[in-house]
Amino acid sequence: MSNIITKSPIVNPEPPDYIPPRFPSLYWPFPLAGTQSSFLFRPPDIWKFTLYWTLIFYGAIHLTACGFAVVLVGGKTRQNYKWLAGVVLLYAIVSGVEGVVSGSVVGGL
């Protein structure tokens, strides 16, 4: 079994002076004087990058859906506003849990 692992063609291409790129982007499409693209080599860096962007996208989508729910249901009576705070909180919790789970799965692959 150790023969298979030692003969694996996968090599770590990480340069010796590797510094993880700053969040939020690995690639900046606009012309600059410096480097245009960066790469992630270490698994914890890949996981964090994927997790952060997944949380951002899931949060934005759930916030939009929650906004529609508040607009459609909230304007009818004053009593609806009392439980709409719970709906907003529920959407935030669901998006956070979904973001962490899917970001961890995708970033861990």
Image (tube, rainbow, N blue to C red):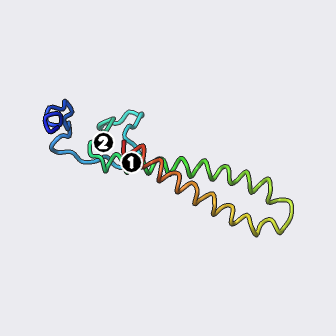
Q: Could you tell me which residue is drawn at 42 percent across and 43 percent down?
A: 106
Q: Quadrant of the N terminus?
A: top left
Decide which of 25, 82 is in the foreground and name it: 82
Relative height, residue 51 to residue 14 (above, below): below
Please tell me which of labels 1 and 2 falls first in the chain: 2
Decide which of 22, 31 is in the foreground and name it: 22
Q: Could you tell me which residue is drawn at 13 percent across and 34 percent down?
A: 3
* Left or right for 94, reference 33: right
Secondary structure beneath dot 1 equals helix
Calculate the distance from the C-alpha at mark 1 to the C-alpha at mark 2. 9 Å
Q: Quadrant of the C terminus?
A: top left
Q: Whole-percent x and y of residue 23?
A: 38, 49
Q: Could you tell me which residue is drawn at 73 percent across and 63 percent down?
A: 84
Q: Spot the residue most to the right.
A: 77
Secondary structure beneath dot 2 equals loop
Residue identifier under label 2: 40
For the residue marked with disc 2, what is the amino acid?
A: Leu
* Left or right for 59, reference 80: left
Q: Are marks 1 and 2 in contact (CB under 8 Å)?
A: yes
Residue identifier under label 1: 49
* Left or right for 104, reference 44: right
Decide which of 90, 24 is in the foreground and name it: 90
Q: Whole-percent x and y of residue 97?
A: 52, 56
Decide which of 52, 7 is in the foreground and name it: 7
Relative height, residue 58 to residue 92 (above, below): above
Q: Which mark is residue 73?
A: none
Q: Whole-percent x and y of residue 7?
A: 14, 31
